[in-house]
Image: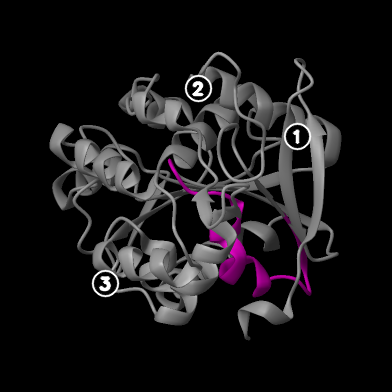
Amino acid sequence: MPLDLVTPVLSSVFNAERRRLHLRRWGVGEKSCLLLHGYGDAGHIWHHFATNYISSHRLYAIDFRGHGDSDWSPDGCYRSEDLVAEVLLVIEKLISGPVVIVGHSLGAEIALEVARTLGPNKVPAVVVVDFGPDSPDEVELQIVNNLRKYLRPFVTVEEFVDLLATDRPLVDRQLLRYFARESLRFSDRGGFTLKLDPALLDRVHSDFDSWQLFADVSVPICLVRGLGSAVLSRSVAQRLAERFPNIELVCVVRSGHGVLLDNPAGFLAATAPFLARTYNNW
């Protein structure tokens, strides 16, 4: 399905400080799914995934504060606990029944904490995408350095696409172009700039004990790893699956940490059986 033929419904929720949280919604089904993006991305990263479920599900994607079209924190505060609080607010306001949460990277950390907070009746399953304990410091530094490269003016969207292609060589050019268009805003000085608060570059660490997060969430977890990921190593992923019987480990070929863009079809195929079993049990 061409990316531009399915347009999500756009809306907003306001947090306790009256800061706007931007949301996308796809589908009209009764089965709810909440999608949480990774560090430096935004809710549009889920577009390909979400449009494959629009006939049977209602899917929501949040732009975390400081990302995408959500407001920036005025004091540069981007703690995990603040993101968790805002996700809990969105669920309270918009999702009355149970909801499966799918999170990538930072979004997976938030998903696990939300699941731990709300319990299995509200969150019956979680999909954790390329996130786990013991991520190497040098890998996190590389992610930050890539974002730092993007925080400059671009004369055209295609200029940003060219830069992205050097860092995401596995991603289809059409998909990169969609990602670039959604990631940029027009600057009043001319050209385009990234929709990202530069203060986020100081927020690269996890605020939770990742091993404990996995230990405390007893519902079924689908742990998705990009086969070439440097963030979630094969050994750590296997240790998680061996230690916790509720974890189902699946790997996506031809992908690294950016599984959703590197191999969208592979990600769909890897998660579809787990989601089908989860929703069939409702």
- In the displayed image of the protein, which residue is found farthest to the front? 189
Q: Which residue is mark 2?
A: 78
Q: Which residue is mark 3?
A: 169
Closest to the observer, 69 or 89: 69
Where 52 sits versus 135, above or below? below
Q: Position of residue 126 (x, y in %)?
A: 53, 45
Residue 218 in sight = no
Amino acid of disc 3: Pro
Residue located 41% across and 26% down the image: 213
Residue located 67% across and 32% down the image: 71
Residue located 32% across and 64% down the image: 163
Mark number, residue 90: 1
Which segment is the magenta one? Answer: 39-59
Which of pointers 1 and 2 lies earlier in the amino acid sequence? Answer: 2
Marks 1/2: CA–CA distance: 17 Å
Dot 3: element: loop
10 Å crowding of disc 3: few (<14), some (14-19), many (20+):
few
Which of pointers 1 and 3 lies earlier in the amino acid sequence? Answer: 1
Where 32 sits versus 201, above or below? below
> Does 30 sit left or right of 266 as displayed?
right
Closest to the observer, 11 or 46: 11
Q: Position of residue 149 (x, y in %)?
A: 30, 47
Amino acid of disc 2: Tyr
